[in-house]
Structure formats: C-alpha cells, structure tokens
Amino acid sequence: MLKRMITKLNVVASAPLGWLSAIFFTVINFFAPEAYSFGLVFVAVFLDAVFGIAVAVKKRGDFALSKLARLTLFKLAAYAASLIIIYMIEMLIHDKGFIGIKIAAGWAAACEFWSLSAHVLILNPNIPFFRIMRKYLRGDIESKLDTLNKKDKSGQQESFSDIFK
C-alpha cells in the first residue's frame, strides 16, 4: 500500500499541474484557520461591487464593467495583502487566537459596508436602517455621484439634496 502511494505521488509530481495543485492546496491549508475572515472580506467587496453596478445603471443607464473590475480587483488585492501580512505576523507571535486578522477583516468589511451603505442610499434614500447614517455618508455619496455623470438624462445636475427630497 505504501509503495502504491509513493507511485501515485511520483505521478502527480511529474506533471506541472500536479506541482501547481500541491502549491495551491498548501497555501489554502495554511490560511484555512482564518477562512471565514478572508471570506467575509471577499463577500463585502463583492456586495459593494453589486450595489455599485446598481447605482451606475440607475443613474446613467449603463456601467463601466472594466473600471469596476479594476477597482474590485484592486480592493481584493489590497485587502488580501493586508490580511495576509497581519495573519503571518500573528502566526509568528501567537500559536492560537488570531485577533489581529479578525480586527483587520472586520475593519475591511466595515469599510465596504460604509461604501455599500452610500450605494444603497443613492438607490433608495428611504430605507430606514441606512437613513440614520445619511448625514455621515454625505461626503461619500457626493463623491460617488461625482464619479457618475455630472448631469442626469434631463440635463440637470444632481446634488446631495436632490437625492434626498
């Protein structure tokens, strides 16, 4: 049985795909204890992108997928790099209870929630949960509206107060 396992390992190691698979699963196994933290950030970035598309479609009637993809990929890379660095520092210092990665993942998810909240308020300003944050999101909403067309379809320029009439 041991001889058969060694033979199978030799077959896997003889192909580049086998080596890539082994490296991939080693990396996945290394980060497995904090998979939920990484998943939380991924889901937050994805949901922010979905609501960003919805805002662009509602306000302009179209959206720039390539710009959205670049921004989303940049966010994922930035958050992943931060979480990986913090996770590896935690691995060096602690043998259990990775609080730093949880704080970083929570902070990244909170930032994405903030952005998502602005998108939701642009789409529907009367949702009670998000209305309580409206005055704190004013700058974020104004910057998001500035990145969209400065004028709506009737030629009128939109402002923060126009959305919340």
Image (cartoon, rainbow, N blue to C red):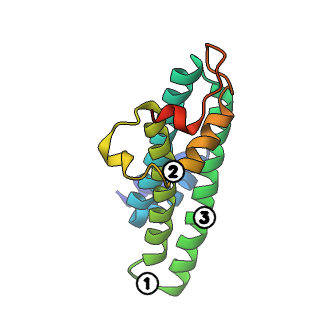
Is residue 122 positioned above or below 108 on the image? above
Q: Which residue is mark 1?
A: 95
Q: Position of residue 2 (x, y in %)?
A: 39, 60
Q: Split into 4 quadrants, where in the image is the C terminus?
A: top left
Mark 2–mark 1 distance (CA, rounded to whole Å): 40 Å
Callout 1 amino acid? Asp
Q: Position of residue 129 (x, y in %)?
A: 32, 47
Callout 3 amino acid? Ser
Q: Residue at left 61%, top 13%?
A: 154
Q: Which residue is mark 2?
A: 137
Q: Which mark is residue 82?
A: 3
Q: Residue at left 39%, top 82%?
A: 96
- Could you classify mark 2 by the number of other residues whose Cα lies within 10 Å: few (under 14), some (14-19), or many (20 or more)? some
Label 1: element kind: loop
Viewer can see residue 19: no
Is residue 71 positioned above or below 123 on the image? below
Closer to us: 10 or 103 = 103
Q: Which mark is residue 48?
A: none
